[in-house]
Image: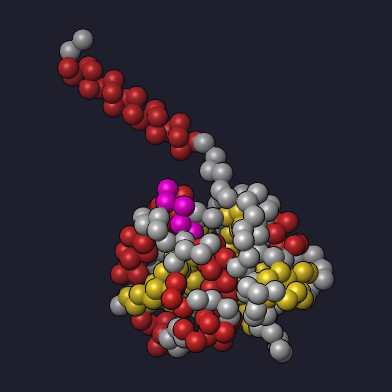
Amino acid sequence: MSSARTSTLAKLRGTIERLEGASLPYAAERIGLGHGAVDAVLQGGLARGAVHEVFAPESRHAAAATGFAAGLAWRSAVRRPLMWVQQDFVARESGALSMNGFAELGFDPRRIVVVRATDADMALRVTADALACNALGAVVLDVWGHARQLDLSISRKLTLAAQTSGVTCVVLRTATDPSASAAETRWVARSVKSPPRPAWRVGVGPCVPRPPTCAGRATPTWSSPTTTASPSSSPTTRGSASARSARRPAWDTPPRAA
């Protein structure tokens, strides 16, 4: 057989292997969030090694969405470092990240690395590089407004990188509307009156064009130091959640895989 034919056959075999590999479903480990009804519709918890989107529909909900995204990322990191990639404009509009604030939520600031990016392009490049490092547990991409760079193609690339390394990516977007994405889940977080514990009104649903994975609404609360929030209603209704005391913050208990 000539070398040209051998080379062609090798390329065809490689193409077939890649296509067959791409068709196999990705089985992600799932981390329970501590809210039983939400975990149920997530089919066991939040998928690790995947992309999850958190939206603040208006700038006045930016702080609430930031706290909620931090909880998802921290829970997914499983005691590994968390990298937070923040666009400079976000800090100018809604304030810089506070290590004291993270500590009040029960997080260890020593495990959080904050990277400031001049624009959305730089933030995407840093996030892509960070997702290739499996020494990290999670990466948060924090951008403001309608970033044209975050299209369906880019979200697919981020998803592939997360699945390859097992590092979870949480995309936090403020003051913009959701668009087509390859993310595993999409959350819309809003602030609610929540004395004395932090609380959010959240909606979770599928990302277009992916088929529905979960959908519903809930109002989880956070209390530090606490572990598990138990819902008083299903995630398809606007319910509240109470927390039971323990030594670690909510979403930082030992993970349970589905």
Name of the residue lying farthest toward the left: 3
Q: In this image, 107 relative to 250: left or right?
A: left
Which quarter of the figure has residue 13?
A: top left
Left or right, 2 with respect to 28, comes to: left
Residue furthest to the right in view is 232
Q: Which residues are magenta?
A: 164-168
Query: 166 left or right of 37?
Result: left
Instruction: Identify the residue at image location x=33%, y=66%.
Output: 126
Looking at this view, name the residue that lies furthest to the front: 247
In the rendering, at what x and y percent does residue 3 appear? 17, 17
Tell me, yes or no, if residue 143 can be seen here: no
Is residue 79 in view from this perspective? Answer: yes
Answer whether residue 136 is magenta in the image. no
So how many labels did they put on this image? 0
Q: Position of residue 204 (x, y in %)?
A: 65, 64
Q: Is residue 239 above or below residue 205?
A: below
- In the picture, measured across the screen, residue 210 lies left or right of residue 216, that is left
The N terminus sits in image quarter: top left
Residue 192 is drawn in which quadrant? bottom right
Q: Quadrant of residue 153?
A: bottom left
Write the residue at 51% across / 64% down: 79
Name the one closer to the observer, 90 or 48: 48
Q: How is the image coloured?
A: secondary structure
> Where is residue 249 shown, x and y percent of the image?
62, 74
Residue shown at 30%/77% (left/top)? Answer: 118
The image position of residue 68, as x and y in percent, is 58, 74
**Which residue is drawn at the image coordinates 64% and 80% (left, top)?**
224
